[in-house]
Structure formats: C-alpha cells, structure tokens
Amino acid sequence: MGRLALTNLIMNTDINPGPIVSVGIMEGRDQLRGWLDGRFRTEGGACLSGGFVAQTRDGQVIVSDEAGRAVARSPALRLSAEGHALLHLFGVVIGSRFHWERPEDQTFQGNLLILPRPDGTITAINEVPVEYYLTSVISSEMRAEGPLEFLKAHAIMSRSWLMAALERRKEPCRARPSARNVGSDSTDEIMRWYEREDHHLFDVCADDHCQRYHGITKIISPQAEVAVKATSGRVMTYRGAICDARYSKCCGGLTEDFKTAWEDRDIDYLTSISDASVSHLPCPTEEQATRWILAEPDAYCNVKDNRLLESVLPDFDQETKGFFRWTVGYTRHELEDILTAKSGINFGSLLDLTPLERGPSARISRLRIVGTERTITVGKELEIRRWLSRSHLYSSAFTVQTRRGSDGLPEIITLHGAGWGHGVGLCQIGAAAMASRGFSCEQILSHYFRHIAIEKVY
C-alpha cells in the first residue's frame, strides 16, 4: 500500500479524531531539512511543496526551497497540510540517550509548526488529532502485528496518559518538582526524575521520554487501526479522573511504585503488583533483591516464545536481548570513566556502589557512589541507569558484585539485573503475553492498574 493510500485510509475513518495534540519531533537543531509531499500553506497564504530547509535568523524562521530561495519567513511558521499531503523530516533522532539511539527519516501527516529558540536553534512540532497520533504510537511503541487485545489495551492506556497530560496543561502553572538536592552540601545527594512537564513548547515529545511517535514512517497495520477505532475515546479513570497511565517494556516479574521513579507521592493505581498468575513478594531489602534478581520466577513477561516477541517488538527493540534477566560487567577504570563522563563529577578511584533504597520490584531509587575524592548518593531510577552506562542500563533493579584486587580496590564490578525500563504501571511484554493467553484488554488493564474504570470521554 502506498503512502498516500495509507493516509487516506487513516484520514477517512469514521471515528471522532479527538482534540489536536502538539508533538515535539526535533529540538536544538541548527537547521531542519525535509520534503513536503503535496501542498502545504503558510498562515500568510503562501503554498509550499517539495524539498525545503528551515533555519533561524534574527528571531525569524526562514524556509528555503531546493534552489536555496527564501520562500517563507515568520517569527513562528506553521505549514498546514492540504488534503492528504505528507511531511517528510530527515535525520530525526529516535531513542535519544538510550542504547538504541539513531537518526531516522520520518513521515508525518498533519501540520508542521517551526519555532525559533533564543540560542538560534529550531524546534519542529507536528500538530495532529489524538486518534491519528495514537495509531502511530501503537505502531511505534510496539510492532502492530501483536495480539489485538494487547493493542486495544495499549490504545486505551496511551490515550489515558495523553489525555491526563493535556488536562494538566490546562491547570494554572504550579511547581512540580523534577529534582531534589539534599544535605549540608547540596551535591551530597542528587535526586532527579523526568516528567512530561519538562516540555514547554509542545504537549508531548515523540520519543521514549513521553511516548514513541514515529508518524507513519512504519507501515501502520490494519490491526493497529482496528485497535484504536475499537477503543475510540476510551480512557482509564480512577475516582472520576483520567489516569496518568505509565508503562515500560519489561517489569521483570514485579511492577514498581510510582514514587520509585518520580515524585515522592503514592498513586493508588500505580503501585507494585505481581506480574504473574501467582503472588510474588516485594523485594525492598538487599537479601530479597539478590534472591529475586538471580532467580527465574514465573511471570507473564518471562517470555520464552521468540515468535511472540518478534510480533510485538519493533526491529530496533529486538536488538536488545536477555532483558528479563541480564548481566553487565565493568573494570573499575572503565566505570570510573563512565561516571565522570555521565555525571560530570570526579569521584577519584571508585571504592563502592551501595544501594540505599529499593522499591518493591528491587529497583534502586537511591545509590551511594563512594570514591576517594567524592561520595555522592544519586537517584532516582533513571538517573542511576544513566550514570552507570555509556547509554544507560536496562533498569535499576540490579545487584552489585565486586571483585577486589590485593590493594583492596575493585577490579571488576558486575551488575546482575532484572527487567527493562522503570517498571511502573503496565508491562508491555507481560501484557502481550497475557493477550496471547486469551485475556481481554479490560482484564489486562485491570491487572496492571488496580481499581480503575474504563470510560468514553469523546
């Protein structure tokens, strides 16, 4: 099916497309290059098509055609698609700061908003209705050939997360912490976490920080469209409010509490549960965590069927192997170099890595790093993962095994770990496995998000 025919199929659905969402596709770029497949019109009435380059100069966005002629200029430039015009953007980075990071040429439907930044760079934003956005998310987060009930559950969950985020943007501006420094010397403890509120120019970003949204770059299967259409306008609610649904790739057998990854507050529907038909005890102590991580527990996400994984994981995710249980080893000098590069702190000779606080899934939320020059406690889970890897670790559910030399200094540091991602909310691999066993989308969502209701909001 050609791109134009594919877009006709999406655009001509008889569902309510929902509100418009603004998705940040690219930020901090010196220039933006792309191709307009069809007619796009500026707010000043100019009609553009074909290849283009966008740059900033003196606070203005300047768009030039293939011949280098300036064809549009504005402090904020919106290109509105006419009919079924498509937008191609070159060199979009996916998996930013993750181990699968790479550039990719991507194709989008909807409008393009180009904004200048004070530092002379460009932000590119795609404006698209929620239901079209979700059809892409389902096909970008996971492979859309997965079990239909899983895709339907994902559609409801992703819509819930997005609609909750849009509702929060309507609220009066209020401080939502994304970091906490503790101690007489404020750098003794560094606590950081990352929320959607980190974005100011658009509603959500297009990468894993929010939800993967790769436009229609990948062929959107009929299965993904069926899932979105079958759940159109449906969201999860808790006590009348839309759920701020969270999810990760593989919980490792136990999901995690919200406060382990983000702000220090409890959210009733984002608490740890056993991702299995049997009950597993929480693992907040070192002894329990070690026993759990070194085991092979029964869990929905402990999938041995490669065919199921191939049906739900995008190609670049299939490059990640052994994520239910994994092992990473470093020499002391290698880890010292990584810590300096990722944290900007000179620890001197590394002496110890000591977990101080774990959540129920054994994920570490506070890790003490002891060196001859500095001792720092770092958190939360994502910051720990970033500091301990050139890309970052699959998860912060790991134990530390140290082999020391005759001088007492570590020679080899081995991390044995469990799961892939923060582990909060729905486990994508576990949910896919549940669907393959015959669970409905409602049963899947009720398993991961306790005491929720499913309601239609548009």
Image: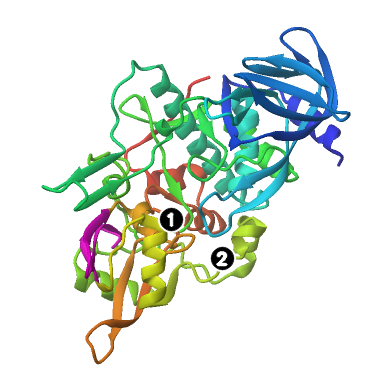
Label 2: element kind: loop
Q: Looking at the image, is 421 positioned above or below residue 303?
A: above
Q: Write down the region rendered in magenta.
A: 352-378
The image position of residue 332, as x and y in percent, is 35, 77
**For mark 1, what is the residue?**
421
User: Label 2 to label 1, Cα distance in Å?
Assistant: 12 Å
Q: Are marks 2 and 1 in contact (CB under 8 Å)?
A: no
**What amino acid is found at the position of numbered circle 2 in the picture?**
Thr
Q: Looking at the image, is 354 positioned above or below residue 69?
A: below
Q: Looking at the image, is 421 positioned above or below residue 320?
A: above
The image position of residue 157, as x and y in percent, is 48, 38
Q: In which quarter of the image is residue 413?
A: bottom left
Label 1: element kind: loop
**For mark 2, what is the residue?**
320
Q: Please tell me whether residue 356 belongs to the stretch shown in magenta.
A: yes
User: Which residue is located at x 32 percent, y 40 percent?
Assistant: 269
Q: Is 353 on the left or on the right of 88, as rendered?
A: left
Q: Find residue 331 and name its label.
A: none
The image position of residue 2, as x and y in percent, is 87, 39
User: Which residue is located at x 52 percent, y 59 percent?
Assistant: 433
The image position of residue 42, as x and y in percent, is 74, 13
User: Which residue is located at x 41 percent, y 65 percent?
Assistant: 338
Image quarter in which the N terminus is found: top right
